[in-house]
Image (spheres, grey):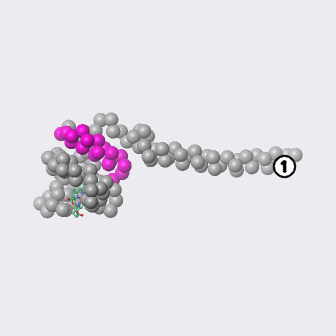
């Protein structure tokens, strides 16, 4: 009798494992699909100085600064970034859309950074 109980307990544990897995994966993918819901991607107060510039400084400036920047494009200050926002290239390159090459080259920005830049551009790329 005792042996059967142990077997049943073991069986129950075994059967519940996949359920735990599936639940875990579901939560992960929800955060992946909607990062703004996870708390990790705060897009409520996007500004150039505090949101966008840190992204371009960290991911674009190494190639797009100085006297001979890659592609002849400088991304060092507001005026330069605003010009790229207005002609559509900024949003196009980070999404590899419109026939533009993906930037940064080879590996896209994290979803949250792309979203942040898109929100700033959609707001008219203000100098805030
Ligand atoms: C490792 C170097 C490197 C990094 C980092 C990089 N770029 Fe570039 N970028 C290039 C090169 C090289 C070109 C020109 C060649 C080409 O078009 O592929 C270019 C071209 C561009 C162009 C002009 C595209 C066109 O066809 O008019 C834009 C806009 C641009 N990059 C934006 C960005 C932005 C925004 C980032 C950061 C999110 C970034 N780049 C990061 C190397 C880089």
Residue at position x 33%, y 35% in the image: 44
Vertical comparison of 54 with 45: above or below: below
Q: Position of residue 17 (x, y in %)?
A: 65, 49
Q: Is residue 105 magenta?
A: no
Q: Residue furthest top?
A: 44
* Horizontal and vertical percent position of residue 82: 17, 46
On the rendered image, what quadrant is the C terminus found in?
Answer: top left
Q: Magenta stretch?
A: 109-127
Q: Position of residue 102 (x, y in %)?
A: 29, 59
Outermost residue on the right side: it is: 1
Q: Position of residue 56 (x, y in %)?
A: 25, 51
**Left or right of 78: which side holds 103?**
right
Q: Residue at x 26, y 50 (%)?
A: 91
Can residue 81 be seen?
no
Q: Residues within 10 Å of mark 1 (few under 14, many from 20)?
A: few
Asked whether residue 91 is in view, the answer is yes
Name the residue at the left extreme.
67
User: Closer to the camera, 34 or 62?
Assistant: 34
State the SS at label 1: helix
Residue drawn at the location 46% of the way across and 44% of the way down: 31
**Helix, strand or loop for the magenta stretch, by majority:** helix
Which residue is tagged 1? 3
Q: Would you say 26 lies left or right of 126 here?
A: right
Q: Indicate yes or no: mark 1 CB to ligand 1 under 8 Å.
A: no
Where ligand 1 lies, by quadrant? bottom left
Q: Is residue 2 left or right of residue 60?
A: right
Q: Is residue 51 left or right of residue 82?
A: right
Residue at the image position 44 percent from the left and 46 percent from the top = 33
């Amino acid at each position: 009798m005792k042996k059967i109980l142990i077997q049943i307990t073991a069986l129950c544990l075994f059967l519940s494992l996949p359920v735990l897995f599936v639940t875990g994966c579901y939560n992960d993918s929800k955060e992946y699909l909607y990062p703004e819901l996870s708390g990790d991607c705060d897009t409520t107060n996007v500004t150039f100085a505090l949101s966008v510039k840190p992204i371009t400084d960290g991911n674009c400036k190494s190639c797009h600064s100085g006297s001979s920047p890659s592609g002849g494009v400088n991304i060092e200050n507001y005026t330069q970034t605003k010009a790229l926002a207005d002609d559509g290239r900024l949003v196009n390159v980070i999404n590899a859309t419109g026939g533009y090459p993906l930037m940064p080259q080879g590996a896209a920005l994290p979803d949250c950074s792309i979203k942040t830049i898109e929100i700033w551009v959609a707001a008219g790329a203000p100098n805030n």
